[in-house]
């Protein structure tokens, strides 16, 4: 996962994609579901950045479903910022903002910080969905008591499971 992210950051997207596809295959073959969630999310982010929103939707959906099945709270919280970015790119900025606000609350409630990659996706999604500049302390402590199960269920509702019809 981290090697693929480093490769993507340095511009070797094809190699990053190949590594993630291989990692996903290995995780499925060996039934390593914890790593599968992360690899699916990372590949989803990569293809989303390439504009392949339908494939990203499928990958994020599977990542959320598997993460929820195995109750991998850290992986779920770290997938949600990328899902928010996807939802925004699908033309639903209000839903994307609402999901980002929920992520703030989940981070506070669980005490689990976003990984560097997810924090980057979070900040990018915040910037894309807000007209005002992003404050340096972007993750607020406004409210507590948000349900991760409800958040994942809502995110799954927002991700299209059929062929996409792009707005505009």
Image (tube, grey):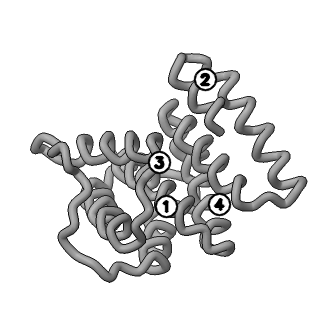
Residue annotated with mark 1: 159
Return the x and y of residue 92 as percentages of the image width and height: 31, 56
Return the x and y of residue 76 as percentages of the image width and height: 53, 63
Q: Give yes or no for contact between labels 3 and 2 (Cβ–Cβ under 8 Å).
A: no
Residue annotated with mark 4: 62
Quadrant location of the N terminus in the rendered image = top right
Residue that extends furthest to the left in the rendered view of this protein: 132
Q: Give neighbour class at mark 3: few <14, some 14-19, many 20+ (Cα, 10 Å).
A: some
**In the image, which is nearer the foreground, mark 1 or mark 3?**
3
Cα gap from disc 2 to disc 4, whole angstroms: 23 Å
First along the sequence among labels 1 and 4 = 4
Displayed quadrant of residue 150: bottom left
What residue is drawn where x is 55% and y is 52%? Answer: 57
**Horizontal side, residue 6 vs residue 125: left or right:** right
Residue that extends furthest to the top in the rendered view of this protein: 11
**Horizontal side, residue 17 vs residue 8: left or right:** right
For numbered disc 2, what is the local secondary structure?
helix
For numbered disc 4, what is the local secondary structure?
helix
In the depicted view, which residue is nearer to us: 30 or 40? 30
Residue annotated with mark 3: 115
**Up-down relation of residue 9 to residue 155 (above or below):** above
Cα gap from disc 3 to disc 2, whole angstroms: 17 Å
What residue is drawn where x is 89% and y is 55%? Answer: 30
First along the sequence among labels 2 and 1 = 2
First along the sequence among labels 3 and 2 = 2
What residue is drawn where x is 45% and y is 67%? Answer: 155
**In the image, which is nearer the foreground, mark 2 or mark 4?**
2
């Amino acid at each position: 996962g981290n090697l693929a992210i480093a490769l993507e950051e340095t511009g070797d997207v094809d190699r990053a994609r190949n590594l993630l596809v291989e990692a996903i295959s290995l995780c499925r073959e060996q039934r390593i579901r914890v790593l599968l969630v992360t690899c699916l999310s990372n590949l989803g982010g990569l293809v989303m950045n390439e504009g392949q929103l339908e494939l990203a939707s499928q990958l994020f959906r599977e990542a959320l479903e598997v993460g929820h099945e195995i109750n991998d709270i850290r992986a779920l919280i770290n997938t949600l910022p990328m899902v928010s970015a996807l939802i925004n790119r699908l033309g639903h900025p209000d839903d994307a903002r609402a999901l980002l606000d929920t992520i703030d609350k989940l981070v506070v409630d669980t005490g689990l910080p976003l990984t560097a990659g997810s924090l980057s996706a979070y900040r990018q999604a915040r910037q894309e969905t807000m007209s005002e500049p992003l404050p340096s302390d972007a993750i607020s402590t406004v409210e507590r008591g948000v349900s991760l199960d409800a958040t994942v269920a809502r995110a799954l509702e927002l991700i299209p499971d059929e062929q996409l019809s792009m707005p505009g």
